[in-house]
Amino acid sequence: MGIIKNRKVNIMLTVGFIGNGKSANRYHLPFVLQRKDKIKVKTIVTRNLENKTWKRIDGINYTDKIEELYNDPEIDLVVICLKPDLHYRYAREVLEHNKNCLVEKPFTETREEAQELFELAKKKRLIVQPYHNRRFDSDFLTTMKVIESGKLGEILEIESNYDYYRAEVPENVKEYDGKAANTFLYGHGTHVLDQVISRYGKPDKVHYDVRQLLGTNRMNDYYDIDLFYKRENGKSLKITVKGSYFRVKPRASFIVYGTRGCFIKETEDRQEEHLKLFYMPDHPDFGIDSPKHYGTLIYYDNKGNYHEEKVISEKGDYGRVYDDLYEAIKNGKEKTVKDEEILYQIKILEEGSKNLK
């Protein structure tokens, strides 16, 4: 049997987008375009072709006909960057057209919808998952590295904060629309909950404090959720995720307490800060912390000596979501964002939002 020479293997992951707004252009495309050796963006579906808010990218087909994307056999992966209440509908359509699917957060409003998508994807041997880019935040990666170093001893408590001062947003919302997917908890709490669940799994107990600070029938603008993990030694790890729209001075991004000390990371990952300034990932210092952003580690070593030191931050990279998807779709590796993690996260989101009025 002769050797086949010059056989071309399709190693490129060809991608299409549904939606051409801030999500696609700020949080996806800058990272995808850095991976031109293995990922190609072919088509972007936009509702209004005349809208040029975002600069058109050379080599990409912009269309208002979604069938061009659905019926293109070259497209391996479709990314949905639409309003949350449209996620389930379009994700199902994408899977029914035999395309892998990446969905902006929040993935779906209910576990029932998420389960349907996972079952359909499994039936068709496809991948569907949410875009949990915050697993690759610098502050989160740095905090996990400190925990894994063992310098803090046994970890007793972790606090994660996601704060803003955007009073004009909840003040302008005069009526709660009843859609949980549009709440602060679903929109932003989903990030920090995913971080926790991705590392620590399903908690044994959850305590909820999800509020409308301006009163009933107003926007959800605050959450404070405690997750408790039992240990074999009888002790319990408490992880708290908090967020508010009314924090003029944000709380520290992460605080960790252990039996030997604590770690405080005041500032959050800087990728979003740079993206908002249109300072893109092609700059070598994109998203990189300077020394003033480094976290502080305070601990006693095995000999009882006191240490206080700065911890150089890990490098964050939202594009790692696409690296993982490439490996899963093209090389058959297990996907990083597991179905069971997402289903449990949505359970927490549903439970936390049920008493909003």
Image: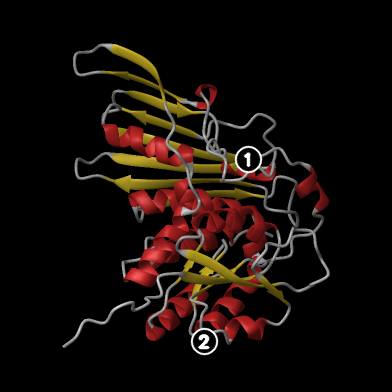
Q: Name which residue lies at 58% across and 62% down.
A: 354
Q: In this rendering, would 157 be left or right of 161?
A: left
* Figure disc tally: 2
Q: Nearer the viewer, mark 1 or mark 2?
A: 1
Residue 248: horizontal and vertical position, in percent?
Answer: 70, 31
- The residue carrying mark 1 is 274
Q: Quadrant location of residue 65?
A: bottom right
Neighbor class of circle 2 (other Cα within 10 Å; few <14, some 14-19, many 20+) is some
* Three-letter amino acid code at the position of disc 2: Glu
Q: In this rendering, would 3 be left or right of 139?
A: left
Q: Confirm whether residue 316 shows in the render.
A: yes
Q: Is residue 346 above or below residue 266?
A: below
Q: Quadrant location of residue 15?
A: bottom right
Label 2 secondary element: helix
Which image quadrant: the N terminus? bottom left
Tell me the number on the disc at residue 96: 2
Between disc 1 and disc 2, whose residue precedes?
2
Residue 146: horizontal and vertical position, in percent?
Answer: 34, 32
Label 1 secondary element: helix
Q: Nearer the viewer, residue 104 or 301?
A: 104
Tell me the number on the disc at residue 72: none
Q: Name which residue lies at 48% across and 47% down.
A: 317
Residue 140: horizontal and vertical position, in percent?
Answer: 44, 41
Residue 235: horizontal and vertical position, in percent?
Answer: 26, 39
